[in-house]
Image: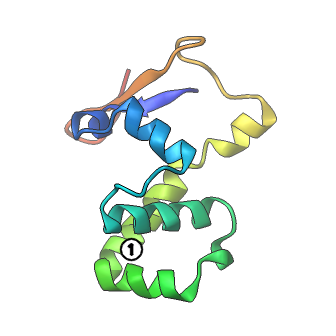
């Protein structure tokens, strides 16, 4: 399933920014955004690889509640890795990205 979270787009996320992240070109991003990306990268690959200085910087810029929320969000949005790896994921619109939209109650609407 290839989707983009519509609320992220509405908050300003665009394909150019996504391309910058994928290319590792994040030098112009705010410091706290780069820290959040470092956390997400580590959580998705090897959580124990997060350097102590990055952990200290994360704790300096984010509250414990925010760090838990970031961690849970990364984990939630990576649940699709298993079906993708197994080849059992389903494309909503073959070959195209689909918006992922939620109603006011947090339910996914197509």
Q: Residue at x 34, y 82 (%)?
A: 64
The residue sitting at the top extreme is 94
Does 94 appear above or below 102? above
The image shows residue 54, relative to residue 5, as above or below, that is below
Q: Nearer the viewer, residue 17 or 25?
A: 25
Question: Residue placed at 54% from the left, 58% from the top?
Answer: 75
Q: Is residue 72 left or right of residue 84?
A: left
Say left or right for 89 vs 32.
Answer: right
Crowding at mark 1 (Cα within 10 Å: few <14, some 14-19, many 20+): some
Image location (x, y in percent) of residue 92:
53, 17
**Dividing the picture into quarters, in which one does residue 26 lie?**
bottom left
Extreme residue in the right direction? 86
Residue 67 location, quadrant: bottom left
Q: Nearer the viewer, residue 106 or 36?
A: 36
User: Where 18 sits versus 51, above or below?
Assistant: above
Residue occupied by mark 1: 67
Q: Position of residue 88 (x, y in %)?
A: 74, 28
Can residue 86 be seen here?
A: yes
Residue at position x 51%, y 66% in the image: 38
If the image is split into quadrants, where does the C terminus sit?
top left
Which part of the image, by quadrant, shows the N terminus?
Answer: top right
Instruction: Where is residue 17? Give x, y as percent.
Output: 39, 40
User: Would residue 1 be found to the left or right of residue 36 on screen?
Assistant: right
**Left or right of 21, for residue 14:** left
Answer yes or no: is residue 63 visible: no
Q: The residue tagged with tag 1: helix, strand or loop? A: helix
Chosen colour scheme: rainbow
């Amino acid at each position: 399933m290839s989707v983009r979270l519509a609320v992220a787009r509405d908050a300003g996320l665009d394909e150019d920014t996504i391309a910058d992240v994928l290319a590792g070109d994040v030098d112009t991003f705010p410091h706290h955004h780069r820290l959040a990306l470092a956390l997400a990268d580590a959580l998705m690959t090897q959580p124990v690889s997060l350097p102590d200085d990055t952990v200290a910087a994360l704790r300096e810029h984010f509250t414990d509640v925010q760090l838990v929320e970031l961690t849970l969000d990364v984990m939630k949005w990576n649940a699709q890795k298993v079906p993708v790896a197994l080849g059992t994921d389903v494309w909503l619109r073959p070959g195209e990205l689909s918006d992922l939209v939620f109603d006011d109650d947090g339910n996914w609407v197509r």
